[in-house]
Image (tube, rainbow, N blue to C red):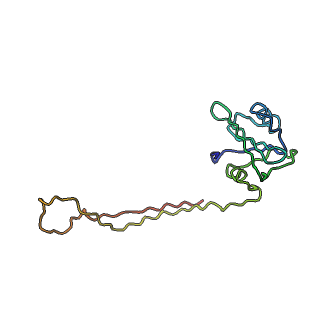
Amino acid sequence: MIRLGAQTQVYLAAGATDMRKQIDGLAALVVDVLAADPFSSQVFVFCNRGRDKLKILVWQHNGFWLWYRRLERERFWWPMSASEGPVKLSAREFQWLLDGLDPTRVQAHKRADFDLIITVGRPVTRPPPYRSRRAELPHRAPRSDSLHTRQHCIILRSC
């Protein structure tokens, strides 16, 4: 599984790409076709004509990662017109693409954020401390520290 940061942009090279290209050839396509910097830590994705193979190029720290994905029976959604230029996806939409979904048609639930803080306390009894049999004393009322309050905080933020 490929994990990306929320701010990472994914660029799809629209149209078909020759899958014989390796890191250097794909990095040249990033510069020439996508007009982007291959050393920018963004994700660049290329697809073959049959739409069943992907190559994913990423620069990380001191070298390139090149991932290859091949589907056995299905096809990836892919923008076929190269005249439109690169297609930008979020990291979330990229995961949808890898899962076989069309990111232009998928609508996720909106993120729910709230601005509410609730603190709820309820008394909880503590078990009595361990005592040896030799130190048994006549029964006394429970000490005040045998009861304490367990607090539960629920923090909700609003967008």
* Number of numbered discs on residues: 0
Estimate the x, y position of residue 61 in percent, counting from the top left: 62, 33
Q: Is residue 109 depicted above or below 11 in this figure? A: below
Estimate the x, y position of residue 159 in percent, counting from the top left: 60, 59
Q: Could you tell me which residue is drawn at 74 percent across and 45 percent down?
A: 70
Q: Is residue 137 depicted above or below 50 in this figure? A: below
Q: Could you tell me which residue is drawn at 76 percent across and 59 percent down?
A: 105
Estimate the x, y position of residue 118 in percent, counting from the top left: 46, 65
Residue at the far front: name it: 72
> Residue 33 sits in which quadrant?
top right
| Residue toward you, 63 or 109 | 63
Q: Could you tell me which residue is drawn at 68 percent across and 33 percent down?
A: 64
Question: Going by the image, does 133 lie left or right of 23?
Answer: left
| Residue toward you, 13 or 99 | 99
Estimate the x, y position of residue 96 in percent, counting from the top left: 70, 54
Question: Going by the image, does 156 lie left or right of 40?
Answer: left
> Residue 109 sits in which quadrant?
bottom right
Q: Is residue 152 depicted above or below 47 in this figure? A: below
Question: Going by the image, does 62 lie left or right of 44?
Answer: left
Q: Could you tell me which residue is drawn at 72 percent across and 38 percent down?
A: 57
